[in-house]
Amino acid sequence: MSDLVEILYLVKECVTDMNARGLKYWNTFYPGSEIIIRDLQSRSIFLIKDNEVCKGMITLDKDAPGNYKNMEWHSGSEKVLYVHRMAVHPKWKDAGIVEMLIGQAEQYARDNEFTSIRLDTFSKDSFSSDMITAHNFKKAGEFLTEYQKTPFYCYEKEI
């Protein structure tokens, strides 16, 4: 809980940057403080910090988003790790933080005997999609949400 303010600041900076680039899938409500507190309480949020500065975060758990239920995944895996709320401070976007966060997800999956990792990205966010595919995630499909008329792409990587 001691990292809450710093995480909320990271999210705010990311939302501001995303909005400036026309990517409006995160906002002042999502991910809000209630979600971040829940991630902290469940110990499912992981941070990349340098000199006590939070440069990135990722939430990892076994809870599948509701939008995934009709997706045709590549693997029939029963033990799946889901990535939620991955963020990197815009100032350090090119500093290898994404690679560290994905590496954390992969290591966590191996250590806890997950057989695949699943996540989604906003289709207009080519930076995120490129980073995910560069780490050998395979596109599995897409979905629309009730509040976004632009699709999200789903990806999966077997471990």
Image (cartoon, grey):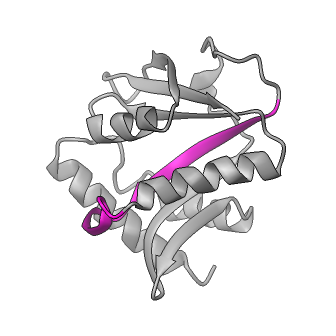
Q: Is residue 8 above or below residue 129?
A: below
Say which of 49 and 6 sits in front.
49
| Farthest bottom residue in view | 51
State yes or no: residue 94 in magenta.
yes
Task: Say which residue appears at 50% left-offset and 50% top-offset.
Answer: 85
State the quadrant of the C terminus.
top right
Instruction: Indicate yes or no whether the magenta region holds residue 69.
Output: no
Determine if residue 59 is in view.
Answer: no
Residue at coordinates 34% horizontally, 35% vertically from top-left?
Answer: 130
Q: Name the residue: 15% across, 51% down.
A: 20
Q: Position of residue 152 (x, y in %)?
A: 41, 26
* Location of residue 32 in the rendering, given as x and y in whole percent from the top left corner: 47, 59
Specify the quadrant that holds the N terminus: bottom right
Determine whether, in the image, residue 144 is placed left or right of residue 124: right
Residue 20 visible, this orientation = yes
Horizontal and vertical percent position of residue 40: 66, 67
Q: Is residue 111 above or below residue 55?
A: above
The magenta region covers 79-95
User: On the rendered structure, is 127 left or right of 6?
Assistant: left
Closer to the camera in the image, 78 or 95: 95
How many numbered circles does the render carry?
0
Estimate the x, y position of residue 131 in percent, counting from the top left: 39, 41
Q: Residue at 59% x, 28% y: name it.
A: 156
